[in-house]
Structures are given as structure tokens and as C-alpha cells.
Amino acid sequence: MLDMTHYVLGALSGGLVGFTLGLVGGGGSILAVPLLVYLVGVKSPHIAIGTSALAVAANAAVGLVNHFRAGNVKWRCGLMYAGAGIIGALGGSTLGKHFDGQKLLFLFALLMIVVAVLMLRRRKETGGDFDECKREYAPKVAGYGFGTGVFSGFFGIGGGFLIVPGLLASTGMPMINAVGTSLVAVTAFGLTTALNYAASGLVDWLLAGIFILGGVAGSFIGTRAAGRLAGKGQLTPIFAGLVLVVAFYMLWKSFGAMV
């Protein structure tokens, strides 16, 4: 049973995730699950994943509104991608619910290492003029959507670090459109996973609400800080290093609990 101290830590954790999302963009929400487990003290890895999935969906929805206002969202592509991915996310999250909690954390830590490495690779701008998804794009878009949906649902993450490359590969749209459009899928995948976990009683709604409120405040601060610090080019490498440290700590803790 969580007490007031845990909820305060939940707000601070949400603020940290929101701050990193505002500061470095994609990949920031990867810290949600380890913060809920190791800082807030959520005993069940499955409740941590279900709760974080809801928070990720809420944060992505806020980002989606901002990108929509900036004209960066290609809705037809996003809905095609998310439509196929929701099926994958439902299957992936169902599998994740029945997977041993400590083994899930161990695999999650390995995923964090992959995310950190991908973040250290520089994204190159791709695509030229792009209007909307054509009918011939549908099989490829749906295929990438389903695959990343399974992955997102299993680990309870937004999966933006996979969705953006998936949109680039399947449509050839410019990077800024891929980032904005990816948030359609991130919102859909996170909500699908959260509702699937909630159906099994694996979401702490109060903690999720507090985490989300902290994330909104943190995102505002992080976005403002990014405008001042981004030119130095050190934000992503520093954050990737932090993700690696947390990942190795999770490997040690989860492996110790399995043996």
C-alpha cells in the first residue's frame, strides 16, 4: 500500500520524466518504469508498467496537440500506423501481463541499453516534399505499425524511438513529420496497453494521475531549458549515459531477484 511519501516521489518521478522528454525528446519516457519500481516503490513490475503506459499516453497526447498546431502531423499515415499497431499492442500487452515480472524487468533493462545506443546515433533528415500516405503505402505502414505495436505493448512503453524510424522507412516523410505523426501511435499504443492492464487491475490510477501532473510541469520546464541548452549538443549523450547507468542497475537487481 502506497502512502503520501510514495505519491510525492511519484510526482517527482513524473516531473523528471516530463523534464527529460522536454529536454531530449524521444526516449525520455523509458525512465518511467524504473522510477516507479526503484524510487517510488511499486512492488509489482506489472503495475509499474500498466501505470507508466497510461502516463506515457497522456504525455504523448499533449505533445500531439502541440505538433498538430505546428502542422507536423500527417493524420492518414498516423491512423494507418496506429490502427495496425493497436492490434499488436493488445497482443503484446496481453503476453507481457503473463510474463514473470523480474524477467520482464531484466528484458526491459536490455531494451534500455538498445535505446541509449540508438539515441547516441545522430538522426539524419530524410524525405523531401511529402503530402500524405498513398494507398500503396498501406501494407508497409501497417506492417511496421503492427510490429512496433507488439513491442510497445509488451514493455508498456511509447515506442517512439521505433515508431519514428518505422514511419521514415515505410513512407519517406521528412523527420519533423515523422516525429509529430509518431505521437498518434504512441498515444494509441500507450492507451491500449494501459486499458489492457487496467482490465486485470494492474493500474494504480491515483499514482498515474499524480505522475501525469508531475510530467506536465516537468515537460514545461524541460522544454524551456532545451531552448537554452540544445545548442551545446551534449543533452542527448548525457541522457543516454544516464539511461545506461539505470539499465545496468536494473540488470543487477532483476537478475539477483531471479536467481
Image (cartoon, rainbow, N blue to C red):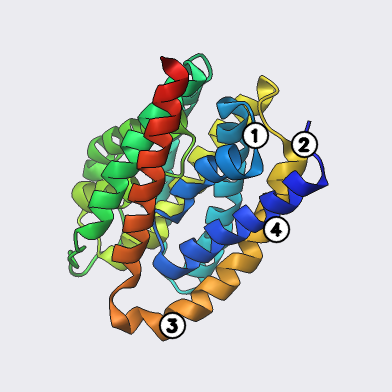
Q: Which residue is mark 3?
A: 227
Residue pointed to by mark 2: 2
**Residue 34, image x, y percentages:** 51, 41
Q: Which residue is mark 4?
A: 213
Q: Quadrant of residue 92?
A: top left
Q: Amino acid at mark 4?
A: Leu
Question: Could you tell me which secondary element the residue under label 3 belongs to?
Answer: helix
Which x, y percent locates residue 202?
66, 26
**Mark 2 or mark 4: whose residue is earlier in sequence:** 2
Compare residues 165 and 233 and report the one nearer the observer: 233
Tag shown at residue 42: 1
Q: Secondary structure at mark 1?
A: loop
- Within 10 Å of disc 3 (Cα), the crowding (few <14, some 14-19, many 20+) is few
Give the mark toward the camera: 2 or 4.
2
Label 4: how many Cα within 10 Å (few below 14, some 14–19, many 20+):
many
Q: Nearer the viewer, mark 3 or mark 2?
A: 2
> Given contact means CB atoms under 8 Å apart, are the residues at marks 3 and 1 in contact?
no
| In contact (CB < 8 Å): disc 1 and disc 2 | yes
Query: As drawn, is 213 to the left or to the right of 56?
Result: right
**Callout 1 amino acid:** Val
